[in-house]
Amino acid sequence: MSRHDHFSTRAIHIGSEPDPSTGAVVPSLSVATTFKQDGINKLLGGYDYSRSGNPTRSALESLLTSLETCPSQTISNDARHDASGGESLVFASGSAATAAIAQWVTLSEKEGGAGGKDGNGHGGHILAVNDVYGGTARYLARASRPTGLEVTFLNMEKAGEKGIREAIRPDTKGLRFLQNAMGASPSPRDCHLMIRSIKTLSVRMIKHGLNALRLSHWLSTQTDLVERVRYPGLKTDESFEYVQDLISKNAKKELSYLGWKFPFPLKKTSETEGVEEDSLEFSKTLGIPFGGMITFAIKGATAQQAEKFCTELRIPILAESLGGVESLVEVPYGMTHAHLPQETLKELNITPNLIRFSVGIEDYDDLVEDIEQALRAARGQVNGNGHA
């Protein structure tokens, strides 16, 4: 591969080079637990036991390393490392990765850890964003407490860049040891499926973003049903100017092919007159496709009405998690963030009527029709036919 190949090209080819012995264009799924050695510690291909390393997992780690590395850096097709020594590690779950990081903080510097409070592996201190994923918050605040680890949850936007940079520790080699020692690696089958999924990531993300951009705009116009909408890609969102700086060069490149310009021009309403609302040209006036996550609050709704909205939906599924091709909805107040104290929920503006919507890649018109009927059902409104 050329070192100048871009994201979508790397996503398809890195880690998926044709097999030199068979010519297979899809990476092999290696389900072996153990590997033959030519002698004591004389490994064939560098593998001895799948918990420590597996060819399919190496292919995924090589792919992820390439995607997290800028195109100007050289990428080896068959290695997990970039030219600067960077390396990717994949874990069986986000919780496994969280546990490894928490333990890494308390490892001594000699062992490849952050050194803890005194450099010898005692205690330690983690700075975490205050709206971090619920499972991560629970682990950091409760499960890691016996290790002496201290955790501070804070608003990173207000924390100050200098202080955060000073807290970053670059020496993370101890994570490889912890992954192996904990047995926290994913199965070869999981790695194989992820490699296949990543190949279409670029095209899927455009659809996620377009659906979310249009849906967030539509929701913001339903003032009789919805009282607030948050989508950072919407030009009326308070974070819009900030997130423009977060969009990767690759994403800007892909969006520029579709006609988006950066920095985004804040067009006047008059410039959209005569533009059909279901057209791509209209979407370009709304903001920027910026992922598929939306939050909105149902106007005046109780917790019971928020739940009714979710159960009345025909297409989006009431389920935790996010980022899949299928649309998912949940109520953070009673589900993912229910463990948080009331003062924290208030600070984060997580109310009983707040809906978290992971927008999938279904047809936009189908989603709008379904969401509208569920909103009206939740509010107890009926249409002209007498149906909710």
Image: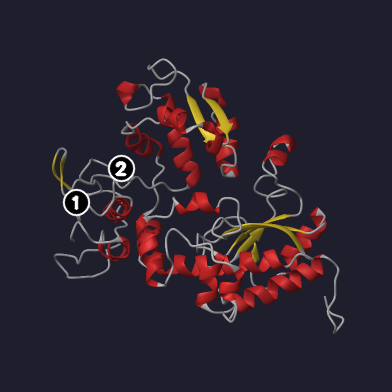
Q: Is residue 168 above or below residue 95?
A: above
Of residues 50 and 16, the one drawn nearer to the viewer in this rendering: 16
Whole-percent x and y of residue 235?
57, 60
Q: How much space separates mark 2 and mark 1, taking CA atoms?
A: 26 Å
Whole-percent x and y of residue 330?
67, 57
Q: Residue furthest bottom?
A: 385
Would residue 95 be found to the left or right of residue 310 on screen? left
The amino acid pointed to by label 2 is: Ser
- Packing grade of label 2 (10 A; few <14, some 14-19, many >=20) is some
Residue 14 visible at all: yes
Would residue 101 be found to the left or right of residue 23 on screen? right
Of residues 250 and 52, the one drawn nearer to the viewer in this rendering: 250
Snapshot colouring: secondary structure
Q: Secondary structure under badge 1?
A: loop
Would residue 295 be found to the left or right of residue 61 on screen? right
First of labels 2, 1 by sequence position = 2
| Viewport quadrant of the C terminus | bottom right
Of residues 340 and 16, the one drawn nearer to the viewer in this rendering: 340
The amino acid pointed to by label 1 is: Thr
Residue 361 visible at all: no
Q: Secondary structure under badge 2?
A: loop
| Viewport quadrant of the N terminus | bottom left
Q: Mark 1 = which residue? A: 74
Residue in the picture at 41% in, 67% down: 255
User: Splitting the image into 4 quarters, where does residue 217 fall?
Assistant: bottom right
Whole-percent x and y of residue 308?
78, 63
User: Splitting the image into 4 quarters, where does residue 363 fall?
Assistant: bottom right
Whole-percent x and y of residue 187?
39, 53
Q: Mark 2 = which residue? A: 52
